[in-house]
Image (cartoon, rainbow, N blue to C red):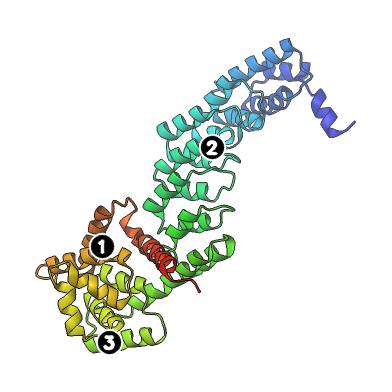
Amino acid sequence: MSQRDESHNEKLTEQDVSRLLTDPSVDNRAGTAEKLGRVLENTRLSDSERRIAEDIFRTLARDMEVRVRQALSESIRHNPDVPHDIAEGLARDVAEVAAPVLESSAVLTDADLMDIVQSKPVEYSAAIARRSAVSEAVSDALAETGDVDVIATLMGNDGAQIADATFDKVVDRHGDDPRVNDPMIDRRHLPLRTAERLVALVSDQLRQRLLTRHELPADVAADILTTGRERATMGLVGPLAGQTDVMALVDALHANGRLTDTIVIRALCMGDTVFFETALAKRAGIPVSNAFKLIHDKGDLAMERLFESAEIPEDLLPVARVGVEVADELADTAGDDRAQIRKKTIERVLTQLDETIDPDNFDYLINRLGRRSRTAVDADSPRR
């Protein structure tokens, strides 16, 4: 007889019952809980036998000893036929008892799981995040816990269904945390929007993994590489860099075809108005002093004409106007505090463009505007 057949025929014997009556030790009760779990899976039990087994289960589920209840939880974790009240009761027990059924029991409903996430400590949520299948609703509840370890576990669980809105929430709050973005990048499927938004928040090494693991469109892949390069380039220009240094960098970028629309706007949004002015002057072929006057003119026409001359798409003009406006407002109070200028610029741009993305992920918006501008330019270009 096979081990499977033996398992099918397993029942509580007279000796088991006698042992419980004469020696109700913790070891005996725990052993009985384990055996009873196997018995309940036996499809050959009669209705009366199953009712008796379930009654014993309920008694053991109220046992004073944690080890007995834990053994019971382990024994029923994979059994889909366990009565709901038993599974739910164990799921709300102390953490070490609850963990097995929280991780594995198909008897628990989404409503059970979400209520436990909201009412129990994070250890319970961590167990739920390890389930082989997690619904979108439960995933969202887990994301709402705000616990990085729980969210990292969820992101690393390919059996978890995660809605785009939940991914957005996680990126907004934890996208720059390697404990979260690392397993997120390694998911079998990652929405394109999420991949794009992660670009600005992860290391160069993780960007390469984004490209390797997820089939991104060519323009998005190019943005991933360009974003990293442009952010690194802007890091070369410190707050104390003089006009000569900035001009040398702008000349080098222009000569190599890297004085892009997005790096010009990115510089302004990072609080580097000197680079912005110098770059526009270079692209328009005019002196920096002339570009300065056009940029800081209070009318609308000057900046628009400068953008036309510099061949920067008009879609980026609203961002530039806001950036210059903030820089001028803060010139007397913030000085060269780029962090404050960047914060105010991004907040104002997002408000004006009616965007709801997180300010820390502003690179995503710049890339998207740049891509939209390139598409518009291509559409307006005459076909050959």
Give the amino acid at mark 2. Ser
Quarter of the picture holding the N terminus: top right
Give the amino acid at mark 3. Met
| Residue position for label 3 | 247
Q: Dividing the picture into quarters, in which one does residue 21 lie?
A: top right
Above or below 103: residue 378: below
User: Residue at (64%, 21%) from the top-left corner?
Assistant: 24
- Indicate which disc residue 135 carries: 2
**Residue lying at the far top of the rendered structure:** 48
Give the amino acid at mark 1. Pro
Residue 48 shown left or right of residue 273 in the figure: right
Separation of marks 3 and 2 at Cα, in angstroms: 54 Å
Q: Can the viewer see residue 84?
A: yes
State the image coordinates of residue 252 (x, y, percent, origin top left). Answer: 36, 87
Nearer to the camera, 154 or 1 = 154
Separation of marks 3 and 1 at Cα, in angstroms: 25 Å
